[in-house]
Image: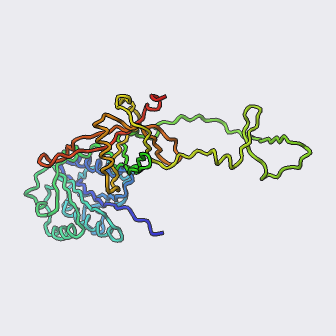
Amino acid sequence: MPPKKQKPKNLLILLVDVGPSNKDFEQGKACAFNIYKGKLFKEKSLDEIGLVIIGSEESENSSDISHISVAIQPAPASFPNLKAIHNLEQSSGVWTGGDWVQGLTVACDLLEQHSAGNAYNKIGFIVISSFESNVELSPLANIQKTINQYGVDVVCITSTDVSSTPLSNLSNVEITSIDQCLSETQFTPKEERNAMAWNVDFLIGDMAIPVTGYKWVGKEYTGNLWTAVMKSKQELVMSTREYKIRTDPSLPALEVDQLVRGYHYGNTIIPMTDDERKAMKYESGERGLRLICFTRKGNIPLYVLQDDTVYVITASAKSTNNSLLLSLIRQLSEEDLVCIVRQVYNRNNAPTIQVLYPVVEEDVEQEEEEESTKKYYFIMGAGKLNQFIS
């Protein structure tokens, strides 16, 4: 078996200025908290995120740069690290060193250390500072070289105008305001997922038309927030099973493999052999849709769509010729008819009766200059159809 392909992951290094010259420390800390929280709550995220403190009292980095600390090594987001960002405090001391250029230098060294043996899809630096301190410009050349080598996206979050600062000398840098960052990261958006296609055949007599179904409206299943539990004393329960065989005592005893299982129906014992059991086993057939009949749309009111799930049935992308399905939808729409079909969602699932409503609509996404095009598809739902028929 070939080795399992690893999912792509990203690397993000946060640089937060806690120096006494940073006038927007509280807002900047809130930005860092929201960004880290978004990574933490992202479903099944493999992204690694680290934290570099600029202007700290301690000096903890491999480059021996004063007042720069690597507070969090790049790793998947965790609640203890989120709490550490929440507990950040602004430095009150007065010293020289520990500016944003030196912070980027430490971030570049951290990137080189962790990139060995790791394949990152995207790499980013987010610098949160006022960018008002005097900095040494000589390290900028090496910083720019590392940014270009690894394809790093640098985002600087500040409330000041940095057009006249040395920050403007760096390329591939995006500048955003603290207010914009707070508004964009206040809520963690739900991760979008691609809809799972239901690829089946639509059987009309002996003719099979490939179609694809997608959930249009579906019930969202969430875990139970509360669970009621009743605590009881554990007791040993003894169970016994008794067999009674009614037979002629003059006949020889039967072997175990000769016994036939059965069912009690009142006082009557009904035997059931293995062959009979297999013959009576239900089989739904292959999954898909099978046409039962056509009927007027007025005979099937639209309220039957009021169910947990409604599907969109359209032409299959794997089919090379969809003209038959499109012609059927167009003709049904013109004749004001709908299809009554038998649906088997998965093999050996209980079949259901569904209704297919033909829909022909203009493609609103096209340009006005282009030739008019239309969309053809079915809406399928049977929330109350089975009750309606019965």
Q: Nearer the viewer, residue 294 or 110?
A: 294
Q: Quadrant of residue 100?
A: bottom left
For residue 217, say whether it is visible.
Answer: no
For residue 123, say whether it is visible.
Answer: yes
Q: Nearer the viewer, residue 322 or 25?
A: 322
Residue 15 at what x, y percent from top left?
A: 25, 57
Residue pictured at 16% horizontal, 59% vertical: 173
Asked if residue 317 lies left or right of residue 369, the reply is right
Q: Nearer the viewer, residue 341 or 32?
A: 341
Relative to 268, say whether 40 is above or below: below
How many numbered dots are placed on residues in this image? 0
> Which residue extends farthest right?
250
Residue pictured at 48% horizontal, 39% vertical: 352
> Which residue extends farthest left?
164
Residue 284 at what x, y percent from top left?
A: 53, 45
Residue 296 at what x, y percent from top left?
A: 36, 31
Asked if residue 143 lies left or right of residue 39, the reply is left
